[in-house]
C-alpha cells in the first residue's frame, strides 16, 4: 500500500471560490430547512402512469438532444405552460417566449450572466431568497435591499432608492422581486403596487426580474396578475418552477421573456438541454392533472401551517411573532431581539433541529438577526410539534426565550 502524500490541488484552485463544502451527513431529525415539499403529496401514481405512457409513445426521441424540440425545451411542456400562465397569471405568451431550465436556480444564473457584470447594482427585496443573494455576492454585484411591509415591497421605498441612485449616476440593472407568496415573508404584492413598480421601471429604465416560483401555492387560489402580464412595454423577465407544485428533485423551471432577451440567454445555456425525461413526464402528467393536484397539495400544506403556528404559540407564547402567510411552504418568525438566530441555528442543529437563520435571507443583518425561516411542508404534523418543542428548549437554554419551560411532555 502506497504511503505517498495525496496530490494537493490547493495551489491550483481558482481565485474567489466559495468555502469548501462539508460532507453530507443527512437531514436533521426535525428538518425545517430548504424548499422541500410534502412527500405524501408527490403524485407518484400519476407520474408513474405518465412515465409509461410518454416513454412508450416517444421514448426513442431520447436518442436526440433536446428530444429534437430545440434548445428551449420539450414543446408539449412549453405549450402546457402557455395555457397555464394565461389561465393563472394572465400572461399571454407563445412557446417561443418560454425556455425550460434546470430549476429556477438555473434561470437566475442565465438572467444574471446575461445582464450583470462585477460592480453592477441591483435592487432587491430586503428579505429575499438566499440563492439570489449568494449569486449576487459571488458575482461582485451590489444588492441594495428595499424594505417590505405586510403587503410586500414598499413602492415608496423603491421610488426613493431609484431616485437616489439616479442622483449618483447609477442605473440599477434590474429590480428583483418575488411578488406572489414572497420568500421568506409569504406576502402577496397587491395589483396596485405591481402597477406602481411598472411605472417606476419605465420612468427609470430599469427592468423587473419577477420570480414567481411559489405562485401556485396560494391557499384560496386567487392571485393578482403577474407583473409580466401587466406590462404593456416589455421590460419584465418572469421565472417559475415545478419544484413547489410537483416535486423539487425534478429540477424543472422556466423563463418567460421577450425574444430579444431570450435570444441572448439561449447561447449561455451550454448544458445541451435540461433533463428530457423530466420534461416529458411533467408535460404528460400536468396537462390533465395539474389543476386538480394543486388544490389538494395546498390543502395539505395549509393544515401543516396551522400545526406549526399552534405549536409555536404553545411552546413560545408571545416570544414568537409571525404573520400567517397567504400560501407557500415557509413561516417567517420574529423572536426577541436578544436571540441571535445564527447562534440558535448551531445549537438547535446539535439537538437535531435544523432551521434557516434570518440573516441568510436578508440584505440587513441587523433587521433579520432575531428572525428565522421555518419550512413546514416536509416534516409530518408530529415532527412539527416535536421539533418546535425541541427548538423552544434549546432557545430557552441559550437565550432565556421563552422564559418558562413548556409543560408539554417531551417524547424522546
Image (cartoon, grey):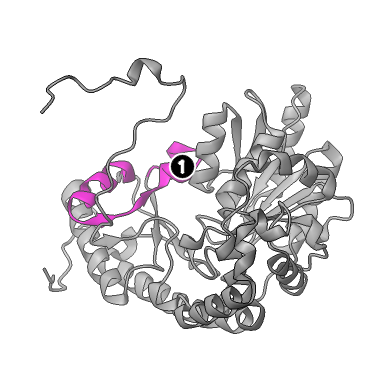
User: Is 354 colored magenta in this rendering?
Assistant: yes
Of the pair 400 and 365, the residue shown nearer to us: 365
Q: Residue furthest top?
A: 11
Is residue 216 among the parts visible in the rendering? no
Work out whether 79 lies above or below 130: below
Image x and y of residue 255, in percent: 69, 54
- Quadrant occupied by the C terminus: bottom left
Image x and y of residue 106, in percent: 58, 47
Of the pair 173 and 2, the residue shown nearer to us: 2
For residue 80, which quarter of the picture?
Answer: bottom right
Sort mark 1 into few (<14), some (14-19) or many (20+) by Cα contacts within 10 Å: some
Of the pair 139 and 316, the residue shown nearer to us: 139
In the structure shown, which secondary structural element does the residue marked by tag 1 occupy? helix
Q: Residue furthest right?
A: 233
Is residue 231 among the parts visible in the rendering? yes
The magenta-colored residue range is 340-369
Of the pair 320 and 224, the residue shown nearer to us: 224
**Point 73% across, 54% down: residue:** 70
**Point 53% across, 63% down: residue:** 243
**Point 84% across, 55% down: residue:** 231
In the image: residue 346, left or right of residue 145: left
User: Is 238 colored magenta in this rendering?
Assistant: no
Image x and y of residue 211, in percent: 64, 54
**Point 82% across, 62% down: residue:** 93
Work out whether 328 lies above or below 398: below
For residue 125, which quarter of the picture?
Answer: top right
Residue under circle 1? 367
Image x and y of residue 72, in percent: 72, 54
* Magenta highlight: main SS: helix
- Quadrant occupied by the N terminus: top left
Work out whether 351 lies above or below 283: above
For residue 54, which quarter of the picture?
Answer: bottom right
Amino acid at each position: 500500500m502506497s504511503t505517498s502524500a495525496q496530490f494537493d490541488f490547493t495551489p491550483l484552485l481558482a481565485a474567489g471560490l466559495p468555502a469548501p463544502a462539508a460532507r453530507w451527513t443527512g437531514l436533521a431529525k426535525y428538518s425545517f430547512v430548504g424548499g422541500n415539499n410534502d412527500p405524501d403529496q408527490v403524485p407518484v401514481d400519476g407520474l408513474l402512469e405518465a412515465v409509461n405512457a410518454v416513454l412508450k409513445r416517444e421514448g426513442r426521441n431520447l436518442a436526440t438532444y433536446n428530444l429534437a424540440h430545440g434548445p428551449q425545451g420539450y414543446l408539449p411542456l412549453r405549450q402546457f405552460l402557455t395555457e397555464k400562465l394565461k389561465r393563472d397569471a394572465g400572461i399571454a405568451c407563445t412557446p417561443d417566449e418560454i425556455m425550460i431550465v434546470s430549476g429556477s436556480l438555473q434561470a437566475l444564473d442565465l438572467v444574471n450572466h446575461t445582464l450583470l457584470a462585477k460592480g453592477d447594482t441591483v435592487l432587491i427585496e430586503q428579505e429575499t431568497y438566499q440563492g439570489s443573494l449568494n449569486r449576487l455576492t459571488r458575482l461582485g454585484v451590489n444588492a441594495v435591499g428595499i424594505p417590505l411591509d405586510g403587503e410586500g415591497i414598499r413602492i415608496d421605498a423603491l421610488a426613493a432608492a431609484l431616485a437616489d441612485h439616479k442622483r449618483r449616476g447609477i442605473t440599477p440593472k434590474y429590480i428583483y422581486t418575488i411578488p406572489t407568496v414572497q420568500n421568506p415573508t409569504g406576502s402577496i404584492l397587491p395589483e396596485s403596487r405591481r402597477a406602481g413598480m411598472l411605472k417606476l421601471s419605465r420612468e427609470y429604465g430599469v427592468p423587473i426580474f419577477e420570480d414567481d416560483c411559489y405562485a401556485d401555492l396560494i391557499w384560496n387560489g386567487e392571485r393578482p396578475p403577474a407583473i409580466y402580464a401587466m406590462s404593456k412595454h416589455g421590460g419584465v423577465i418572469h421565472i417559475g418552477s415545478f419544484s413547489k407544485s410537483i416535486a423539487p428533485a425534478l429540477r424543472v423551471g422556466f423563463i418567460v421573456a421577450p425574444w430579444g432577451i431570450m435570444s441572448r440567454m439561449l447561447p449561455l445555456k451550454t448544458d445541451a438541454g435540461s433533463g428530457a425525461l423530466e420534461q416529458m413526464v411533467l408535460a404528460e402528467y400536468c396537462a390533465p392533472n395539474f389543476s386538480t393536484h394543486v388544490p389538494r397539495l395546498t390543502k395539505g400544506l395549509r393544515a401543516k401551517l396551522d400545526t406549526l403556528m399552534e405549536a409555536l404559540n404553545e411552546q413560545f407564547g408571545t416570544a414568537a411573532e409571525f404573520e400567517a402567510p397567504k400560501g407557500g411552504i415557509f413561516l417567517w418568525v420574529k423572536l426577541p431581539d436578544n436571540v441571535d438566530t445564527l447562534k440558535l441555528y448551531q445549537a438547535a442543529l446539535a439537538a437535531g433541529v435544523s432551521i434557516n437563520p434570518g440573516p441568510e435571507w436578508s440584505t440587513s443583518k441587523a433587521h433579520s438577526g432575531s428572525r428565522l425561516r421555518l419550512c413546514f411542508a416536509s416534516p409530518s404534523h408530529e415532527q412539527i410539534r416535536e421539533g418546535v418543542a425541541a427548538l423552544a428548549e434549546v432557545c430557552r437554554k441559550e437565550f432565556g426565550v421563552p422564559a418558562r419551560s413548556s409543560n408539554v411532555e417531551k417524547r424522546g
